Amino acid sequence: MNSYAPDAHPVLAAMTGLDDFHPLNAAEMKIVANLRSGAFERLGDGLRPAWDDPARTVRAGLLRFLILSNDSSFPMHEKGLSVSGARVTGILDLEGCRIPRDIRLKDCLFDSSPVLRSAIIDNLFLDGSALPGLQADRIEARGGLSVRGATVTGEIRLSGARLGGNIEADGATITAPDGIAITADGLEANGGILLRGAEIRGGVNLSAARLGADVNAVGARIERPGGVALDSDGIAARGDLALRGATVEGEIRMRGAHFGGDVDLTSATLSEPGSYALRLNRSRIIGAFLLCRGASVRGTLDLTATEIGAIDDERACWPQKGDLLLNRCRYGAFIGGPVDAASRLDWLSRQVPERWEEDFWPQPYEQLSTVLHEMGHNEDARAVLITKERLQRRARRARAKNLVLRFALALADGILAVTLRYGRQPLLALIWLALFWGIGVAVFGFAQYSSALKPNSPVVLRSPEWTMCRLEQSENRYMPSIGQVMAGRALAGQTQLSCFLNQLEASSYPEFNPWMYSLDALLPVIEIGQKQYWRPDPSKPNGTLTLNYYYFQAVIGWTLSLLAVAGFSGLVKSR
C-alpha cells in the first residue's frame, strides 16, 4: 500500500496508511467503499445530524487522509470527496495543503472549525453544514467557496484569499455577535460575494477586496448595531453592490470604494441612528445609486466626494435633516425621483454643515444646478443658484464680527437679491427700470396736470411770455428790463404754465411728454431732451414732491443701470 507524505499535524504525523485509522465505523467504511463513484455519499437521510449518531460520525483525520492520499488501492474520483449528513469530529486541518479536487461536505455537523489556511484547492462546498467557524486565510481556489444555507457560529476567515469563482453564502446563518462574522479583507476573486437572504450577526469585513462581479446581499440581514456591520473600505468590484430589501443594523463603511455597476438600496433598511448608516465618501459608482421603493436610512448617508453615474431616488427615502452629506459629490443625472428645484432644494437642505463645524457648502448647489441645466431644466437650475447665493451670503454675514460691516453686507445683499437675484437674473433689473419708468410717468404726468412744471431755460424764465403769465390780464407790473409797465396775460383761474403754452411765442418751445421725461430722468446714458427743457417747479403745489422724486428717479436709474451691467458681466456673483 502506498503511503503519503504526512503534514505536520499532532495526531496524523505518524500515520502512513488507512490501516492506522482502523477500526472504521459503519459511516467511515461506507465513505471509503464509495470513493470511486464521485457521487454524494449520504449518511442516514443525508440531512444535517441534530444529535450524536454513531452511525453518522466521521473522524476529521480520516477525511483529511482520504482527501490527500494518493493510495491506488482506493483511488478517489476526479470529482473529489462528496459526503452529506456526517458528524465530523476533531479538526479537519488542511492548512497549506494542495488539493487538486473538490471538497463537498454538505449538511454536515462539525465539532471544530475546519482549517484551510494557505491551502490550494479546486472548490470547497460546505452547503447546509453547521460549523463553529472556518479558518481559510490566504486560501487559493480554482473555483469558489460555498456555505449556502450553512449555520456558522463563529468567524469565517478569508483574509488574502484568492478565488477563481464566487464566495456563496446565500441563506446562511452566521453568528459572531462579539466581533466579525466574515473576514475577507484583501480578498481577490474573479467572481463575487453572494449573501442573498443570509442572516449575519456580526460584522462583514471586505476591505481592499478585488472582485470580478457583484457584492450581492439582496434580502440579507446584517446586524452589528453600534459598530461597523459591513466594512468595505477600498473595495473594487466590477459589478453591483446589491442590497435590495436588505436590513443592515450598524455602519456600512465603503470609503474609497469602486463599483463598476450600481449601488442598489431599493427597499433596503439601513439603521445606525446618531452615527453613519452608509459611508460612501471618496467612492466611485459607475452605474446608478438607487434609493427608492420604501428604502429607509436612519443615520447619516455620507456621499462626500463620491462620483456617481446617476441617481434614482424618492423623496420619502431621503435621510432626515442633518443626516445627509453631499459636499463635493458629483453625479451625472437624475433617472428617477423629482427634478424640480423645490424638491431638490429640500434634498440639499437635509445637509446641516453646522453639525460638522462648517458654515456652508456651495458645491452641492453648483453640482445640482449643472445637472438640472444639462437635463434641460434651466429655470430650476437658476433657482438653485439663487438659493445658493442667498445661503452663501448669509454665511458670510454670520462670519462678520463688526456690526456695521454686517449691516452694510445685509443692505447690499438685500439690494442685489431684489434687483438682480444676486446676478443670476440680471434681466430683473430691466423690469425694475420699467416699473420706475411707469411710476415716473404717473408722477410727472400729474405734475403736468397740476402745472407743477416750468421751462428749464433761464432765457425763457426771464421772458415776458413766462413772467407776465404769472399775472391775470387785470393786473399790471412794471418791467425794469424794458422800462415799461406791462399787463398780465393769464386768464382768470389759468395757471402760469397753461398761459405760457397758449402764447404764440411758446409754440416753438419743445412740448412736455411725461413718458419721455420719465425715461430721460431714469436712464443716465441717454439724452432724450426732455430734461433739458423742463423741470419741476417747487413754487407750485406738488412741485417740491415732484422735484424730490425727480432726484430719486435719477439715482435709481444710475443704480439699476450699473447693477444691470454688473449682473450681465457676472461681477456680483459669488465665486
Image (spheres, rainbow, N blue to C red):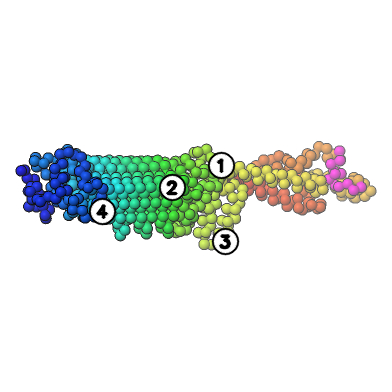
Residues shaded magenta: 492-504
The kind of residue on which mark 1 rests is Glu
Q: Which mark is residue 535?
A: none
How far apart are labels 4 and 1 at the CA level?
68 Å
Does the magenta portion include 519? no
Image position, residue 560 (x, y; %): 63, 46
Residue projecting furthest to the right: 474
- What residue is disc 2 on? 267
The answer to whether residue 127 is seen in the rendering is yes
Earlier residue among tags 4 and 2? 4
How far is mark 2 from mark 3, CA to CA? Answer: 53 Å
Is mark 4 in CB contact (under 8 Å) with mark 1? no
Q: Amino acid at mark 3?
A: Val
Sequence-earlier tag: 1 or 2: 2
In the picture, the disc for residue 50 is 4
Residue holding disc 1: 379
How dense is the environment of label 2, judged by Cα within 10 Å: few (below 14), some, or many (20 and up)?
A: many
Q: Nearer the viewer, residue 575 or 141?
A: 141
Residue 419 location, x and y as percent?
61, 48
Label 1 or label 3, whichever lies nearer to me, is 1
Of marks 3 and 4, which one's residue comes earlier in the chain?
4
Sooner in the amino-acid sequence: mark 4 or mark 1: 4
Q: Are marks 3 and 4 in contact (CB under 8 Å)?
A: no
Q: Residue at x 75, y 50 (%)?
A: 546
